[in-house]
């Protein structure tokens, strides 16, 4: 068994769509980023990559690469899953905390879990997503950004 931890944070800005877990969520702001800014997928990718000890998404998808500007984070997650499969790892479970004052994650939780499970090719019961607030404190509390912490537990059938 191998465990990895992922974290990401993006600023909320006007003029962008908001994606969390590959799901477009109606909101007056979206997340700034070189990609579509999906902090949930980014944190999950970093957790999976970390569990395999193969760097992070910044290494595999650098924000200096203009050819991938605006890339869908679903593609980043699919790429990460391809690496995982080639290295003979399997997901045991994913657990993520979305830290945001709004939107309320509870209202989107099930569709996000279903979409993430579909992209990763695993059962929905292996993916947990929960929302927390900072009770109005800090940059997240002031509704200026969204942060995510994620953990991935992987197993492998090969010697490492």
Image: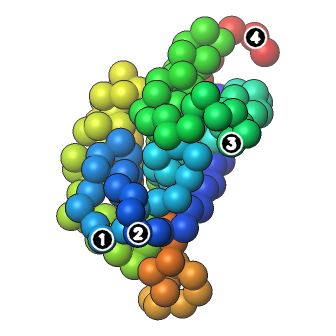
Please identify, in this view, whether the residue under mark 1 or under mark 4 is nearer the observer: 1
The image's mark for residue 28 is: 1
Number of other residues with Cα within 10 Å of mark 4, as a class: few under 14, some 14 to 19, many 20 or more: few
Residue tagged by mark 3? 63
Label 4 vs 3, first from the N-terminus? 3
Q: Seen from this angle, which residue lies furthest bottom?
A: 136
Label 2 vs 1, first from the N-terminus? 2
Residue tagged by mark 4? 159
Q: Nearer the viewer, residue 136 or 113?
A: 136
Q: CA distance from mark 2 to mark 4?
A: 48 Å
Residue at 68% in and 42% down: 63
Whether residue 126 is visible to the viewer of this picture, yes or no, is no
Please identify, in this view, whether the residue under mark 2 or under mark 4 is nearer the observer: 2
- Left or right: 8 as drawn, with respect to 39: right
Residue at 73% in and 39% down: 64
Q: CA distance from mark 1 to mark 4?
A: 48 Å
Residue 86, x across and y down, in percent: 61, 9
Label 2 close to label 1 by CB (< 8 Å): yes
Number of other residues with Cα within 10 Å of mark 1, as a class: few under 14, some 14 to 19, many 20 or more: few
Residue at 59% in and 19% down: 84
- Left or right: 114 as drawn, with respect to 19: left
Residue tagged by mark 2? 14
């Amino acid at each position: 068994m191998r465990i990895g931890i992922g974290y990401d944070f993006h600023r909320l800005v006007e003029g962008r769509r908001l994606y969390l877990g590959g799901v477009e969520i109606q909101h007056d702001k979206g997340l700034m980023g070189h990609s579509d800014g999906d902090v949930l997928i980014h944190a999950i990718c970093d957790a999976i990559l970390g569990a395999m000890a193969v760097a992070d998404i910044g290494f595999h998808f650098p924000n200096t690469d203009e050819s991938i500007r605006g890339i869908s984070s679903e593609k980043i997650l699919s790429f990460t899953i391809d690496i995982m499969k080639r290295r003979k790892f399997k997901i045991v479970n994913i657990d993520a905390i979305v830290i945001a004052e709004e939107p309320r994650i509870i209202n989107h939780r099930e569709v996000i879990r279903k979409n993430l499970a579909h992209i990763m090719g695993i059962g929905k019961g292996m993916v947990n997503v929960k929302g927390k607030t900072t009770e109005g404190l800090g940059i997240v509390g002031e509704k200026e950004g969204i942060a995510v912490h994620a953990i991935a537990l992987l197993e492998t059938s090969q010697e490492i």
